[in-house]
Every structure is written in C-alpha cells, then in structure tokens.
Amino acid sequence: MSFSDKSIICPDCGTTFTFTAGEQEFFASKGFTNDPKRCPLCRQAKKQQRSGSHGGWHSDSSRTRLSSEY
Ligand SMILES: [Zn+2]
C-alpha cells in the first residue's frame, strides 16, 4: 500500500493543511485508520485547552503575582 499527500480542510479554522505521505505511514504504523480532521495547530490548541482547564497553574501564578504587588 502506497501513500500520497492529501489536502484536508480543518473544520475549526478552515485552513487547508497537508496530510503528508510520511504522516500517513506513521499513522498507519500506530494503527490509526482515520485521517486527522483538524490541522496541527488546532490539534495542539485542543490538547493545551484540555490540560490547561485541568491544572489551572496559570490562575495560580497570576494570583501569586498580584498578592506580591500589594
Ligand atoms: Zn485548524
């Protein structure tokens, strides 16, 4: 089975990104049969959103900075 570059339109931001043959091979080797739906940027943003809402270190550090100003 051979792979060839594919153009996919991200449903989140509308950007057309390339799902390269190399990435398809990598996906297949990992056992993924579905094409990625979102562009790399949106995928990364989604990942960061999930971990950010869970940890909440950002609000903690801003609170510390505020209190040290007083
Ligand atoms: Zn996107």
Image (cartoon, rainbow, N blue to C red):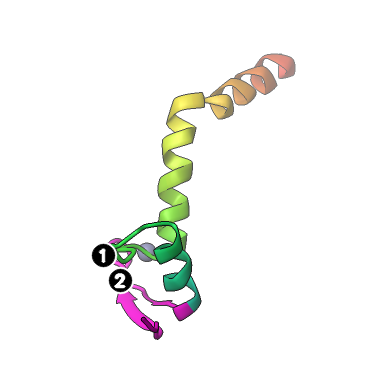
x, y (%) of residue 14?
30, 71
At 34% across and 63% down in the image, what residue appears? 36
x, y (%) of residue 23?
47, 71
x, y (%) of residue 16?
35, 77
Q: In the structure shown, which secondary structural element does the residue marked by tag 2 occupy?
A: loop
Q: Does the residue labelled 2 lie within 8 Å of ligand 1?
A: yes
Does 37 sit left or right of 63 as displayed?
left
Which numbered dot is residue 14? 2
At 48% across and 43% down in the image, what residue appears? 48
Nearer the observer, 13 or 38: 38
Q: Name the residue under label 1.
A: 11
Q: Is mark 1 within 8 Å of ligand 1?
A: yes
At 45% across and 26% down in the image, what residue appears? 54
Nearer the observer, 5 or 54: 5
Quarter of the rendering occupied by the N terminus: bottom left
Mark 1 crowdedness (10 Å alpha carbons): few <14, some 14-19, many ≥20: few
Tell me if residue 61 is in the magenta stretch.
no
The amino acid marked with disc number 1 is Pro
Which numbered dot is residue 37? none
The amino acid marked with disc number 2 is Gly
Tell me if residue 18 is in the magenta stretch.
yes
x, y (%) of residue 32?
35, 58
At 34% across and 62% down in the image, what residue appears? 38
Does 61 sit left or right of 8 as displayed?
right
Q: The magenta stretch spans which residues? A: 1-21
Quarter of the rendering occupied by the C terminus: top right
Give the spatial CA distance, label 1 vs label 2: 6 Å
